Image (tube, grey):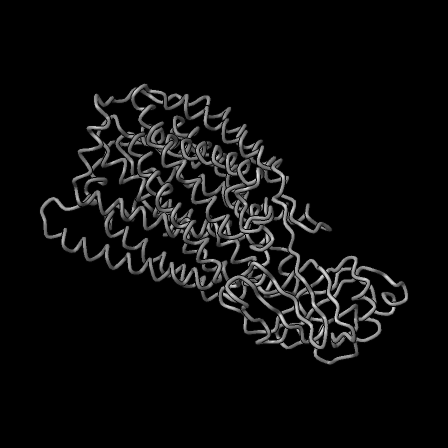
Amino acid sequence: MTFIKNIREKINPALLPMKCHYFLWNAGTAPAVSFASTWARQRGLSSVAVGTVFAALPVCGLLAKPLLGALADRYQLQRALFLAFQALTAAAFFSVQFVPAVPTRTTVALLCGNTTSFRLCPGTAGQLPGTHVSCELSCRNASSLVFEICSSWTESDQCQGPTGSTTETSAVRPTGGTTLEALCDSAAADVQLVAEVPPGNILQQGSSCLELRVGACRVGDACLAPRCGNPTGASCEARCDDAALREALESAASGDDPVSLYQFWLLLGLLALSWVGMAVVVSLGDALCFQLLGERPILYGRQRLWGSIGWGIFSLMTGALIDEFSRGKQKKDYTVMFYILLILVGLNFCICFQLKPGERKRSKNILRDIAKLLPDLRIVMFVAWCIACGLCTGLLWQFLFWHLEDLAVLRGGGVARWTKTLQGAVSAVQTFGGELPFLFLSGGVLARLGHVHTMSLVLAAYGARLLLYSLLADPWWSLPIELLHGPTYGLMYATMASYASIAAPPGTEATAQGLVGAVFEGVGASLGSLLGGILYQRGGAFTFRVYGVGALVALCVHVCVHCVLARRPHYGVQPSDIAGKSTPVQE
């Protein structure tokens, strides 16, 4: 009883709504944000299209955050706008599920003669695979091909999986279950087969075509040499087990011109509204939190960690539910994700309605007060650091799950069936193994190291994390790497928010949080998504390697510049600047 009484005495009831807000808001939006890029991929968008979409979304936040932050500061509308944009986010994100998929046709032309091959145009696979590739072909109205299969194709022993195993372990299998005998006896016009493409048999033809020369084909359990006495052809739907080829097929399927489709613009519009809503809620929520904390911004991390708890729990739970509701379906069913978002954000709205922030100072000229910070080279370096962190975060937000899905397909063995559970587990480890402890400890770290040294630590962690992703072969090994999410997001976010709160002149807190968030997401994450989408055409490992090296280069520049600045008087935001603010605030 004494223990419970002591806890009650330490809890500040005024901060309970903020803790609940962080928990419910992140619990509701986490699955939608985490799975948004893979959901868009399933809707028929290529990596370039997804990168473009998610590069545009933070730009919307770039415009909305400072404008609405300044409006909130000028007219004391933090609470009203905070609530209004929660409702906007829930409505827009829930509506996304009703956007029709972008129509795709992953059709290839199969040509059979003395040799058999199929061509993909347009399409480039970046670095062409040098290993064995299996592609499932579903050919309709191909009676001439069926006749040649039954009369001319002979037995072969060349059917090998991508690792040199027998056909039983190949990552791609026929789905129809029809045997060769049944196919020939029924005189069917449709056929499903698996084309085995040996190493070195994938050739670039011109600038936009790939030719895959088939070594053997599997029809049911039979392994056949695909040679036709009478040259024939067929139009077939294709699915390959190689990530680069799959990306080329998706690019060709979308025609590389999604902007001509109304579905693309409808999706972009709804996601843009969602992102604007989330951006404003996050920046205004942080401003309200710092307002309630008063003279102890060091305690911000202990409020924000409740958001991490919600994120981790519901990401894992939602990923498992998506896999469960997708049993027996060709594609993942994300419906449960949208209903979880609607319920939790609605509950959060009701709780935040009870928030009663106190009076605070007003700035007579917000823009002039903010502009006073710009000539300071320390602020310039802080902005550059925010952009560098945003670049890395943009790649992780949009393409980490892509990379894990591609690794799961290459790994085979049923791993692909549980990709959403794996991705949910990734989010859970990020939260409970990394982000949560670092948010809790962020105040102590900042008090001991200061903001500048903490920023260097964050960049070093980014470099290590991204390079480790580039070395992955088994997607399950991503789980221990996610421990680095602590310094690269938990510590990074606390550092960014507290620095902005300390540097902001009185009465401009919401504006400052909006500007910092706009720079981080609208510039950094936006460019990170766009560049990541372009580089991902050359493969996930290559993309993460480039970003990892870039983070380490940014670290070197950051350290060198601050070594020069350290020789000047009144350098940086010192540990005493935050530790000295000792007005007691209960947690």
In percent of the image, x 29 and y 36: which residue is there?
297
Whether residue 151 sits left or right of residue 311 in the image: it is right
Q: Work out whether residue 350 or residue 413 is closer to the camera in this orientation and state it.
A: 413
In the rendering, at what x and y percent does residue 251 appear? 56, 55
In the rendering, at what x and y percent does residue 359 appear? 30, 19
Figure label count: 0
Asked where in the image residue 59 lies, by quadrant, the reply is top left
Q: Work out whether residue 17 or residue 268 is closer to the camera in this orientation and state it.
A: 268
Q: Work out whether residue 31 or residue 296 is closer to the camera in this orientation and state it.
A: 31
Please, is residue 191 above or below residue 337 in the view? below
Please, is residue 198 above or below residue 283 in the view? below
In the rendering, at what x and y percent does residue 412 appear? 63, 65
Whether residue 302 sits left or right of residue 161 in the image: it is left
Whether residue 534 sits left or right of residue 587 in the image: it is right
Asked where in the image residue 142 lies, by quadrant, the reply is bottom right
Image quadrant for the C terminus? Answer: top left
Please, is residue 19 above or below residue 409 in the view? above
Residue sitting farthest toward the right = 185
In percent of the image, x 16 and y 41: which residue is there?
376
Residue sitting farthest toward the bottom = 157
In percent of the image, x 57 and y 41: which residue is there?
261
In the rendering, at what x and y percent does residue 178 appear? 82, 63
